Structures are given as C-alpha cells and as structure tokens.
Image: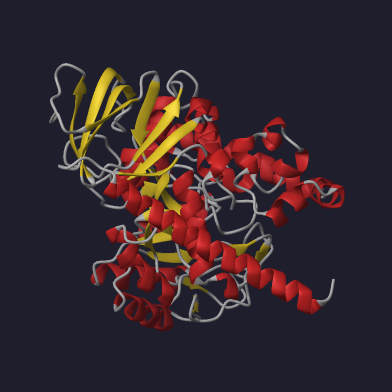
Amino acid sequence: MSKIETREIRRSLVAIFILMTFLAFLLRSAGTQSAPPDGTIVMKDVLVIDGEGGPPLEHAAIVIKGDRIVSVGPVGQVSWPKSARVIDYRGKTVLPGLISDHSHVGQVDGIGTAPQNYNRPNILRQLRQYEVYGVTTVTALGLNNDLFYELQPQLHAGSLPGADLFGADRGIGIPNGAPPTFNLPESQLYRVASPQQAVQAIDEMATRKPDLIKIWIDDFHGSLRVKMPPEVYGAAIKEAHRLGLRVAAHIYYLSDAKSLVKSGIDIIAHGVRDQPVDAEFVGLMKTHSVWYIPTIDLDESSYIYAEKPEWLKNQFLVHALQPALADEFSDPGWRAKIVGNHKQVETSKASVLTNESNLKILYDAGVNIGFGTDSGAMAVRIPGFAEHRELELLVDAGLTPLQAITLATAKAASLLHLDDRGVLEAGKLADIIVVDGNPIAQISNVHKIEAVWHRGKLVSSRVQGFAP
C-alpha cells in the first residue's frame, strides 16, 4: 500500500470518527427530547449501591429530573408524577458513575504515544470510551496543553459527549528525568532545573486555574539518571500552596513518598512499590491527611496482555481496543518480546504484590484512598477497561467489592473536592451505571453494563455496541 493510500485511509477514519461523535451527541440530545413533559425519569425496582459504603438498598426507585437525582428509596416510599417515564430495571443493580483520580488524555492513539495525539478528535474519542465503560469523570493528571482548557467548560456543561474532565495542567519534571518522554514540547510539560524555575512554572500554571498540579519525582526503576531534588519539589509545593493549589506526585519508592509528605504533598499519585510501608509512613499520611492513589493496574498492564489471560478474549475488553492495539496483542512476536524480558516482568509482578499489600495496610489504617490507574498514559493502560480491572485488583488486595466500589465513587469524588457526584442521593448529578447482577456478590458483575446514564441522559447501553 502506498503512502498516499495510507494517508487517505487515515483521513477517512478521522472523518468517520468525527461523524460518529456527532451522531452520538445527536442521540444524547434525542434522549432529552424524548423525555416526559416535566422531565422526570424513574428507574424502578433496582438494587442501589449508593457509593457511600452502606448496605445496598433492595427494590428501590431512583427519581431523576434534568441532570439531578430527586430522590432514592424503596418502591412504595418514593413518589413521582404520573407523567414520569418509568423504566423497569427489575433484577438490575445501579451504582454511581466511576471517577478516575489519575488518568491521561491525548497521549495515545493506536499503540503510539506522541505530542500530535493531543488533538480534539482523539481526546473526545477517549472520553467517549471512558463514558461507555461507566467512567463518567476523568482526571487528566498532567501533560495537558491549552486544548484542555478549551474542552473543559463544554464537558463540565455536558455539551460534548464523553466523560467530564478535570486535570493538572502540564506538570513539572526535570531535565533528563521523569517523565521519560523527551519529545514532549514545553506546551505539555515544564522541565525545571532549579527551585526558582519550579516556582516560575507553578506561577504560570496558576494563571490557567488548573484543578491540581502534577510533579514527577522518581527515576522509573533506575532507568533515568536523575530524580527531582527535594529542594526543587519543596519549592514547587510551597508555591502551589501559597496560590491555593494542591499537588500530586508521581512516585515509586517509599523514601521519596516519605520526603514528599514531609514537604507538604497533597496526593501520592501512585502506590509505594519498592518495599512494605512502615508505621512512620502510615503515621505521616494520617497526620497530614494526604491522599493515596494505588494505581495497581499500572504495573500489571505492562505484562499481563502478553501472557494471554483468559479474559483477553472477553468482549468487554475487545471493545475497548483500537485495531492497532488488538493486532499487537495477537502478535506472537510482541508477546515474546514482553515475556522474554524476564527481569522487567518479575519486577512488575513484585510491584503489583507490594502495591496490593501496602494498599491494604493503608486502607485498614484509615488513610485517605483515591481511585485511578494511569489509564491513557500508554496504550496498554486502556481507558475504561483499566478502571474495571483496577476494581478487581483492589479486591485481590483484600478489599471487599463494596469497599472497592466506594473508593471508585464517593472517595474518588472527595479527593477531587467534588460534592455533586460519586453518590446516589437527592441533589447529586444523575451519573449512573446499570449492571446485570450484583457486584457486591462478585466484583466482576460490574463489567455487565446494561446502560450508562450521564447527567440524567442515557448515553450508552452495552459496550458491545461500541467501537473505539
């Protein structure tokens, strides 16, 4: 195939995507037009997992008007107008839309990461995929450019299809250090060499009013020559706090995590994975009310698809894969290359186990735990599916399914200081996942999506109808 033919195919695919996005938006609008005269919708006879961690409510009804929940309660104790549209979801379970505290957008397209992927069609494609998989709010934790601020108000207003979007502006790394993506332009990442440059970067980001600030600390398993010095990240944290901004840090090592907490960090954006956490760290986290996002799927995703797990053929995963990624997963050469790197695979597997163990220790101690996966940072960290896999890994770590779901809903909203979502109760946004089966009995039932409602609108049904 010639380069011209290839280029024409790519143009056609982009045009098809734009058309599909527009049609999806029209369908959302049509859902509003078909609503009852007073706009009231009732989900009847459902099992409600409200997101707050309490026991599920059986044979319940949820009354929605516009983009908000009006009431939740047992059928017979909840009233609604006769003109309301009543949907019989008998035998189904409803839970709040999932919230990711740590993802990325616009980094990956197909199997490649490149600055040019940070474009409107690609970001909207990813946000739509998150939404179809029930992730209705996403935090792009760094590596964003000005396009982020163009899209964010429209996504907040629900005038574009896809998950709502929060984020951390560009973020700060250091020269020859993390993140190890050296072709990123300054429009997506600051690389600072001194405390003064760190302060200047914070000041510039503050003018754009980001939701958070992101800093990268570690050396990526020793693959980089340097780590960010404490005097640099200390200056960044101090200046961010002076300006009323919270800071999230990329880490791997326990020693770095301790130093960051002592320097005033607000969010540890990955789990500690080099060794077990100790009493000192637990005490520091609790004393300073620091949030902790384990991102267990991050390490598992680096090898698991090459090992051909049974669920690799599951349609719930298949429909989350772009064609190039699906081809890579089925390529024996790619699989052999990944599993052949024995040292890296063993390190990643050990990191998963340490991460799970540390999470359980911190959770049981009462540390604030958020929810995220670093999805979207690399092709194997698959938007939407990664969040569902993370729920399973949280349960593998020793949490109950209800505790895992609570982290991904109410707790994740709390980390972002959002009080309008993450819980199914009166006054909250009607971001709702409808699933077949009870996820409290078996966490994998959360994958059996029947419908996703976002801001009171039916935006998708089963993921089998979605193509990335």
Seen from the viewer's position, the closer of residues 266 and 45 is: 45
Q: State which quadrant residue 353 falls in.
A: top right
Residue 209, percent across and down?
29, 72
Q: State which quadrant residue 464 falls in.
A: top right
Answer above or below: position of 181 versus 50.
Answer: below
Answer above or below: position of 339 versus 172.
Answer: above
Mark yes or no: residue 380 visible. yes
Residue 265, percent across and down?
36, 58
Residue 376, percent across and down?
55, 57
Please, which colouring scheme is shown? secondary structure
Residue 254, percent across and down?
52, 49
Residue 247 is left or right of residue 274, and the answer is left
Seen from the viewer's position, the closer of residues 398 and 375 is: 375
Residue 307 is left or right of residue 165, and the answer is right
Seen from the viewer's position, the closer of residues 462 and 93 is: 462
Seen from the viewer's position, the closer of residues 342 and 218 is: 342
Mark yes or no: residue 105 visible. no
Answer above or below: position of 48 versus 415.
Answer: above
Residue 133 is left or right of residue 354, and the answer is left
Residue 363 is left or right of residue 463, and the answer is left
